[in-house]
Image (tube, helix red, strand yellow):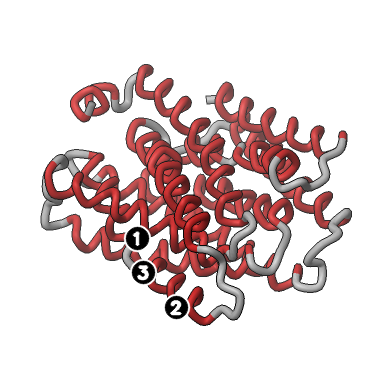
Amino acid sequence: MTEWLLSIEGTEAGHRAALILAVLAAFLHAVFGALQKGRHDPWLSRGAIDLFYGTMAIPFILFVVPFPEPHMWPIFAGAFVIHIIYKVLMGFAYSRGAYTVVYPVVRGMGPLFTVIGAYLIFGETFTLTQWAGVGVLCGGIFGLAVYNYLFLETARDTLGPALIFAVLTGLLVAVYTTYDAYGIRATADPFTFLFWFFFIDGLVLPWVALIRWRRMVNRPAPGPLLLRGFAGGIIAYFSFGSVMLATRLDKVGEAAVLRETSTVFAALIGWLVLRETVGPRRIALMTLIAIGAVIVEMGG
C-alpha cells in the first residue's frame, strides 16, 4: 500500500485518489462529529473515541510501520499541542450550542484559512474559478449556520459563547490541516505519521473524560459510551486518515475544501439521526455547498 501511494504522488491517479479520499473524509467527519455531539456529554464521547483510536494504534506502531525518523518527534509534539487545543475548543462549542449551528461555523472557517496557509507553506495556488468556488462553498456553509440559528429552538441562551468557540475552533481546523499535511509529507512512510499521530493524540482526553465522568452526579452507563468510542475510533482512522493521505497525494487546499462538504452530510445526520428540522431552504444551502466544491474541483 505504501509503495503504491508513493508511486502516485503528484500524478493524475494521485489527484483522483485524493478526490475520493477527501469526499470520504467529509462524510465520515460528519458522522464523527455527530458521535461526539450525540446523547452523551461531548467531553465523554471524545475521551472514549480517543481512548480507542490511541489503543488501536499500539500494535501498528510496534509491529507494522517503520519507526519515525528523529526529525519527526518535534513535528509530533507540535501536532499534539495543536490538536489538544482544537479538541478543547470543540468540546466547549459542542457543550454550549446546537450541532447544526456550531458544526457549519467550525467547518466554514477552515477552507479559506487552509487555502491561505497552503499558499504560504507549500506554494499552492488557486485559479480565479477555484476562488469563486471557495466563496460559493463558504457562503453556503455560513448561510446554513445563519438559517439554523434563526430557527433554533434549543440551547439559544448559550449560543453566543458557542459561536465564539466555534470560530476559534475553525481557525484551529485550518492550522491542524496545514500542519498535519506538513507532518505527513515529512516522513518517508505516511502510515508512520498516521499511526503515531493517533497514538500520541489519544493520550490526554481519555483521562479528562474519566475525571469528568467520576465527578458527575448522574453518570451515564459506561457500556454505551465505550461502544460509541469504539465506533468513533474506527471512523476516525478512515476520516482523519483519508484527508491526511489526500494532502500527501495532492494539493492541501483542494483536499481541505472538498472535506468541508461534510456540512452537507452533517445536516442530513442532524435531520435523520438527531431529529433536527430540515426544510427546502437548508436543502438549497446544502446544494450550494456541493456546487462550490464542484467548482473548486473543476476549476483546477
SS at circle 3: loop
The N terminus: image quadrant:
top left
Q: Which residue in the protein does label 1 denote?
A: 202
Q: Distance between the residues labelled 2 and 3?
A: 11 Å
SS at circle 1: loop
> Which mark, residue 204?
3
Report x, y in % for residue 298: 57, 21
Verify CB contact (< 8 Å) between mark 1 and mark 2. Answer: no
The kind of residue on which mark 1 rests is Gly
Q: Which residue in the protein does label 2 denote?
A: 211
Tell me the residue at 32%/26% (across/down).
Answer: 10
Q: Residues within 10 Å of mark 2 (few under 14, many from 20)?
A: few
**Closer to the N terminus: mark 2 or mark 3?**
3
Report x, y in % for residue 51: 37, 59
Verify CB contact (< 8 Å) between mark 1 and mark 3. Answer: yes
Which of label 1 and label 2 is nearer to you? 2
Q: How far apart are marks 1 and 2 (CA)?
A: 16 Å
Between 50 and 2, the one lying in front of the other is 50
| Residue 81 falls in image quadrant | bottom left
Report x, y in % for residue 217: 59, 80
**Closer to the N terminus: mark 1 or mark 2?**
1
Report x, y in % for residue 128: 61, 32
Is 188 situated above or below 150? above
The kind of residue on which mark 3 rests is Val
Between 217 and 209, the one lying in front of the other is 217
Residue 32 visible to the viewer: yes
